[in-house]
Image (cartoon, grey):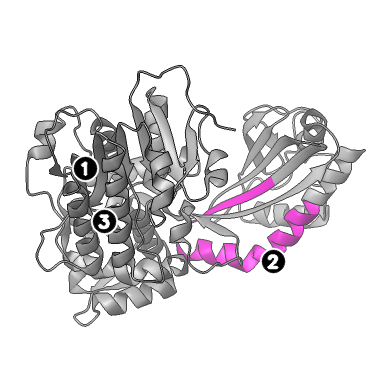
Amino acid sequence: MTTSVHDGAKRPLLLVTGASGYIGGRLMRALHDAGARVRCMARRPDELRDRAPDGVEVVYGDVLEPASLPTALAGVDTAYFLIHAMATPRDFAREECEGARSFAQAALAARVGRIIYLGGLGSDKGLSAHLSSRHEVGRILRDSGVPTIELRASVILGSGSLSFELVRALVERLPVMLIPRWVRTRTQPIAIGDVIAYLAAAAEVPVDGSVVVEIGGSDRVSYLDLMREYASQRGLRRTFIPVPLLTPGLSGRWLGLVTPVYARVGKKLIDGVRNETVVTSTIAAELFPGIVPLGMRDSIAQALTNEDREIAETRWSDARSSIGRTQPWGGRSLGSRRVDSRHVHVEHPPAVAFKAIERIGGTTGWYFADWLWRLRGLLDLVAGGAGMRRGRRDPETLHPGDAVDFWRVEAIERGRLLRLRPEMKLPGRAWLQFEVTPSATGSVIRQTAMFEPRGLLGLLYWYGLYPVHGLIFGGMLRGIARAAEK
């Protein structure tokens, strides 16, 4: 449970709104890790408290409920406004402006020293409804009487960001793509790490009054360039065919079919790609000389590398406002990965419960339908893989790098975590992870199967075998629970 910081009363207090979302969540952690006093405002504070670092204060607040704002803003020196309503089924532009006015008025009354806002790049003429709303919110904040730094960015490249996930979904799922003219619109993508660096530094940059700061990476490219570079780094061969008639409106509706989790925001987002979004001023370099943004290639490479270390720590879909219709079949989608997770309770402490997990494979077997595991090993052997012949080094204990049949131990924290990586032939990459956490009456064992499909074949493999995997993994978890209770 998080608590207020009591030992740093002289340090400035920073308020982060939107901390349950992609940008806000990462900013919250970055500010906390840098030693700042951080307070987060959320509509559902209980949900955020479980994810916030120790020492971060979490309070209730809703910009559409002005009465909730004075308490959240009390004593705040700098407030980050990272709220948007693009996914609302109502008039998102009206809600965004209404929320910005309420927040600005409350910040002025609370004598907040500075507001920092992340908006969107683009000239003020001929903007889409989405970008026009972004600019209008910035104007409302700048005109509020509270000094405001409005950072304007285009496509944000980072594992979990909406723009990156849209590019990923299209390239991963479609070997052949019809590309309309707007796909050649220029943009200036920026890495998520650079965005967080600008936001964090903006709290202390010496500026009088309000200012608009355009930020972007070192490359000006098209959306087609982004898709080609992503395909190249993922080793995917893709064909792009130009077509003249696919409008942004039609593209948005089509996007909702190809990437259904984004259906609610697809049309609004795609409608904005007709606007060129590039940096036109040098003020970012003047105010933030210590930040040298990455280029497109390095930004994409960094995003993919970060996913190799962990599933993205926050994602745009963490925010409730981004949730579209649910799609339980096939598990959850986290970036390029498909995730099937389940848990069971046992009446033993974690150290005892983990012993059953650590004995998995080899002579112990897989706790359910061992004949199916042997069949899968035989098929793998025929395909040139390791099969099930290797067994395991020791029947009781595991260490990083140990072989477990056709799996390899990637990580183990005895009594808490075991992560296995398969060395069988697969159209993608996979992991099987077990976590044990204490509960009031024993332990909770969580089993998570993760798969990163490679292209269309990988997707067909995951969804085609999903019922079988559900049967096997569900039976395995129940078997582990029974073994832990013995």
Label 3 vs label 1: CA separation?
A: 11 Å
Extreme residue toward the bottom, this view: 245
Left or right, 70 with respect to 142, comes to right
| Percent coordinates x, y for residue 456 in the rendering | 47, 66
Q: Which residue is mark 1?
A: 295
- Residue 102 part of the magenta-drawn span: no
2 and 1 marks in contact (CB < 8 Å): no
3 and 1 marks in contact (CB < 8 Å): no
Q: Please state which of residues 354 and 57 is positioned toward the viewer in this rendering.
A: 57
3 and 2 marks in contact (CB < 8 Å): no
Disc 2 residue type?
Pro
Quarter of the rendering containing residue 351 = top right
Q: Quadrant of the C terminus?
A: top right
Q: Quadrant of the N terminus?
A: top right
Q: Earlier in the sequence, mark 3 or mark 1?
A: 3
Q: Earlier in the sequence, mark 2 or mark 1?
A: 1
| Percent coordinates x, y for residue 463 in the rendering | 59, 66
Q: Which mark is residue 226?
A: 3
Label 3 CA crowd tier, 10 Å (few <14, some 14–19, many 20+): many
Q: Which residue sits at x=18%, y=72%?
A: 181
Disc 3 residue type?
Leu
Q: Please state which of residues 369 and 441 is positioned toward the viewer in this rendering.
A: 441
SS under mark 2: helix
SS under mark 1: loop
Q: Which residues are magenta?
A: 447-476
Q: Which residue is mark 2?
A: 467
